[in-house]
Image (tube, rainbow, N blue to C red):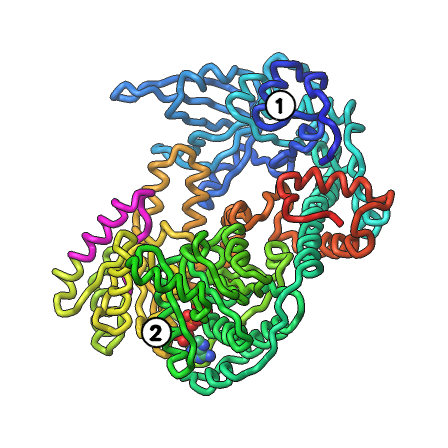
Amino acid sequence: MNGQDSTEIQYVKGIGPVRAAVLKKIGIDSLQKLLYYFPFDYLDRSRITKIIELPKLVEPGNEVTVIGSVFRSEVKYTRNRKKIFFLTIKDETGYVTCVFYGAVDWFQKAFEVGEILAVSSVPELDKYNRVQFVHPEFDRLKTKDEEDETDWNSLLHTGSIIPKYSSGEELRNAGLDNRGFRRILKNAINNNLNSLTEHLPREILQRNTLLDIYSSIKMIHFPKSYAECDHAVRRLKFDELFYFQLLMAYRKRELKGELKGIQFKLERTLTAKLKESLPFELTGAQDRVIQEIHNDMQQPVPMNRLLQGDVGSGKTIVALFAMLTAIENGYQCALMAPTEILAEQHWRSIRNFLKDIPVNIRLLVGGQKKKLREDVLQDIRSGTANIVIGTHALIQEHVQFANLGFVVIDEQHRFGVSQRALLREKGKQNPDVLVMTATPIPRTLSLTVYGDLDVSVIDELPKDRKQIRTAVRFEKDKAKIFDFVRTEVKKGRQAYVVYPLIEESEKIDLKAATKEYEYLSGKIFPEYTLGLLHGRLSSEEKDDMMQRFKKNEIQILVATTVIEVGIDVPNATIMIIENAERFGLSQLHQLRGRVGRGAEQSYCILLTDENYTKRTLQLAVNRAEAHREVNVTKKRLETMVETNDGFKIAEVDLELRGAGEYFGTRQSGLPGFRIANIVTDADILRAARTEAFALVERDPHLTRTENKNIRKEFEFVFKDLLSFVRVG
Ligand code: ADP
Ligand code: MG
């Protein structure tokens, strides 16, 4: 897009003031924005199904498109006098009926016999085994009286490709359905393309074999072939990724170049003791990563490092080595965790690791008694607290450190960018920062998301670990599952039973878990002690419950998703997840990661409703969407059964959800990409990154003539984000 003044779009042929006003509502208020309103898909001849072929396509459940004319439209009544609308479409090979149960009056008016539609849906069978479409999506290609020189003709006879634009009710009412958009975009491209400016210098275009901006815009809307379309898309994706990487380059430059950090020395007085006293040997990956962190710590610039490692890979101990090094140099450390349960756990386990090492470790969470809290705050202020572990409570204003030198943020994806920054700012000098995450990010992606951080990866689990066995089971299997739990508990093991967040309201959530807890403890496992853990318990109650579970005073812990992240009880070997179909993939992986943390064989049982598919389809208004949902759910559960590898799981998850949702745009500080896909476009991403970083080296202030337009464009794209960086 472009940083120029917006031009009135109402003067584009076919728009006018009324449509301009409607367009403005969806954010199209300039010619540039109109030209950047890309098609979401294309219709082409090779992807159109003949009606006669539909019966063969019922089983696979895939979406198909047919093109035909409206043959008949009629309303019928059911026995209990509900209206149903039937629309029959005809092509040269046969007839197919579309059924609409809702908004019957509207649909009845919407179609006219003789007009030509493209209809997309999943073909299904009606009760007489005839193929039908239920609530299909449709795209009007030609009205009844329109002259025959339009899209649809050229589509069928010359094989050209027709763009599809997303629209909405209000847009449609203003004549801006698919067809309307095709018209105005055609006009805008014919008459107003010069409202854009080429912003990339020729050498960058040439080096990366990119189309110029004018051809790209023209071809993404009206490609003559798929090759043209791909070429255009590649250029436009490059733009998005390039400016994003440019932002990363400036952030990194700023972090590295201008700030003065603490130059730690490796004294090894405390770390050597810790290494000696560990009950296990560090893995090669842990050793390597500790070294990477120690290297950073010795540099005069502040460290900003991301530590990535799958659930159970042993990140905590790595952080502890780094913190001890900071303490050897006379600095304080802070470790922030997203939940109280996790903060308490870290506090206990770190105290345990350091029981023979003279280090003062304090815990700060909400809901502590006033006296204790005052005491903790005093220790932080005076500097007698060497390690401070806590939740968000750590970033409150009245928490003042004497000399904070090292910051660890655990499960960093649970925090926003600003929360991380706030903790860093508690240091009088610029502390070194280590952020840790178990949400594994496909390698190519860490460049994009953490482009301004250095990344360390623990890619190896401790030796003693066995693969967790995972299975999908149903309600009818429960008796067997309970027997299995009994066998394991008799061997001395423990189990989790987890309930999903069923409603937004924690109350209902709690009710399901409470009911199950009562049932399990009263009827199924009267001989064992069960616990119920949920978000409404006070922090003391939660801590107490976790302690008892850790000591095996509780054998079976029924819980809501409060236990999702970080919890470490190596003796627990069974994870039962109720309504597994309701969880996201990364969440399932996190939950499963609560077992398999010791040497024993562990199991994960995904319970799901055997009628899930049927029910989902029955309840659905939009069949195509329901089919997609069912397939996605299936794929999630299959993936869990197939693999324990967090990276693979993350890749599938990204594929299923799309990057925007995966990262939560706001959380990650990641801009929403309109057409680039940071997973599948890894090669374009790398090219864009190389160019962006080289550019900042070459012309840091973007003052050279050939880069002036880059600067304008950059400021335009990131006008909301630029407080992060100073260009040059
Ligand atoms: P995560 O990376 O998921 O945060 P933790 O740091 O909680 O993992 O470690 C998981 C468990 O593995 C803990 O009980 C920890 O003490 C143990 N652990 C860590 N490193 C090793 C190792 N090298 N060998 C054996 N067990 C280890
Ligand atoms: Mg952890």
* Residue type at numbered disc 2: Pro
Front residue of 58 and 616: 616
Horizontal and vertical percent for residue 672? 59, 43
Measured in 3D between alpha carbons, the distance from the residue under mark 1 to the one under mark 2, in whole angstroms, is 61 Å
Question: Residue drawn 44% across and 57% down?
Answer: 399
Q: Is residue 435 left or right of residue 519?
A: right
Q: Give residue 126's mark.
A: none
Residue where numbered disc 2 is placed? 570
Cβ of mark 2 under 8 A from ligand 1: yes
Crowding near the residue tagged with mark 1, few <14, some 14–19, many ≥20 C-alpha atoms within 10 Å? many
Q: How many marks?
A: 2
Residue where numbered disc 1 is placed? 179
Q: Is residue 468 left or right of residue 491?
A: right
* Residue type at numbered disc 1: Arg
- Secondary structure category for the residue under label 1: helix
Horizontal and vertical percent for residue 583? 38, 52
Task: Work out whether mark 1 precedes mark 2 in sequence or the reverse, and give the earlier one.
Answer: 1
Residue extent of the magenta highlight:
496-518
